[in-house]
Image: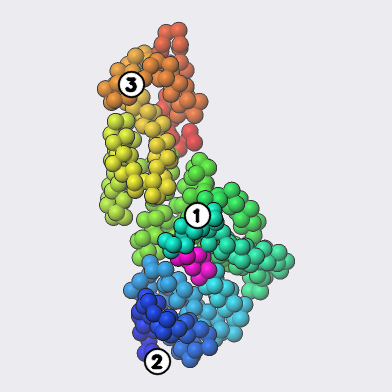
Amino acid sequence: MNFTNFYDYYDKLSDLLQAENLEDAETAANLLSLKDHHSDYKFLQVANPSEVYHDRNAMDWAFDDIIILHVQALYLISSADWHGACTAQTNILQLDLRRLAKAADSNKSRTRRRKAEGTSYYEEAASPIMESYRICVAESRLVPTTTKKIGILNLTNQLFRIYFRINRLHLLKPLIRSIEHVDDLYNSFSMADKITYNYFLGRKAMFDMDLALSEKSLSFAFKHCPGSHVRNKRFILMYLIPVKMFLGHMPTLHLLQFYNLEQFSTVVESVKNGNLRQLNEALQKHQHFFIKCGIFLMLEKLKVITYRNLFKKVATILNTHLIKLEAFSVVLSYLGSEMDSDELACILANLIAQKKIKGYISHQKQTLVLSKQVAFPALSTSN
């Protein structure tokens, strides 16, 4: 099969990969083989194909990564960089294995059988990937051009995806420790792998309520993710937005609209205004979306920030550092949150313990005594 340029090759291979018959599948396999004559085309021997050919038709498509890695491998072979070529092809194999496991788990008849057995193809896929990972980690050479360790970040990302999928987040800790100890080798990892790693690291830190690490990691991923990858940047924002909100940084409506994340708009507004009723309604309205994203419980925790903002508004209106608990109860009742004095005192005590409010409760006088200095510190300093 002959091609005139990269896009001719890309589009033809894309069509073949989407076909559902064995003949086209075999043709597609040849076009991803190093033995096929297409590997001699100079326009397919490109060091950074994702940047050179940045206007591909299906950049968010699953097979796009495979085609790009294959083209990169062709360049490395043409440059006699056998180590790099081997790494690129290995990455393709691991990527294919994980995606094949996903497809197998999605098959309805097999899914029913696997659920009955309590197993997943993802777990089976993790074993050979972990074997490759151990070989790379055990490598003693640290020269970037020859060491097997150069492959551990890509392998770590594949394992991250699997462990998140099967909810085995405790297995991420040793993987993270290994990356933390690669030292200068980290600079030799591809930016794409760094972005993916920081995305998953940020998600893990969010669930652990390590907000500083989560913000740092997710912000890195969002900043360095190419602007053309809107879908990927949207995924990053799904987790970065709640983390930023906990730290007191609210997203703009323009940002939410641009990335089609308007489900957050009412949540943001209600937290800023301390409106508990509006927050509950927003969470209920978009519950399915937030649960699917895996952030519903995280957003529910924003009630703490909403209470803090509400109490700050009450303190501002009354303009005094001595506030009767009854004043808070009246406002909460109006917003549909009936609670007795003990429950209210518990919420205030937690806010004080978390340093979101400076002051103390006089139980004898049923009064919140606020600090005359900064009674409501910036949220970024209290996490």
Lower position in the chain sequence, tag 1 or tag 3: 1
Q: Are marks 2 and 1 in contact (CB under 8 Å)?
A: no
Relative placement, left or right, of 143 versus 205 is right
Residue reaching furthest to the right = 140
When asked about the image quadrant of residue 373, the answer is top left
User: Which residue is denoted by mark 3 in the rendering?
Assistant: 338
Disc 3, SS:
loop
Residue 101 covered by magenta stretch: yes
The answer for how far apart the CA atoms under marks 3 and 2 are is 73 Å
Instruction: Provide the major secondary structure of the magenta segment.
Output: helix
Q: Say few, some or many: other residues with alpha carbon within 10 Å of mark 3 (under 14 / 14 to 19 / 20 or more).
A: few
The amino acid sitting under disc 1 is: Lys
Residue 28 seen from this side: no
The answer for how far apart the CA atoms under marks 1 and 3 are is 43 Å
Q: Looking at the image, is mark 1 or mark 3 nearer the viewer? A: 1
Residue 178 covered by magenta stretch: no
In this view, 86 is above or below 202: below
In this view, 139 is above or below 117: below
The amino acid sitting under disc 3 is: Glu
Residue 39 seen from this side: yes
Residue reaching furthest to the top = 364
The residue located at (43%, 72%) in the rendering is 63
User: Which residue is denoted by mark 1 in the rendering?
Assistant: 115
User: Which residue is denoted by mark 2 in the rendering?
Assistant: 2
Image coordinates for residue 164, horizontal then vertical, percent = 51, 53
Magenta residues (range): 96-104
In this view, 329 is above or below 78: above
Disc 2, SS:
loop
Front one among 121 and 307: 121
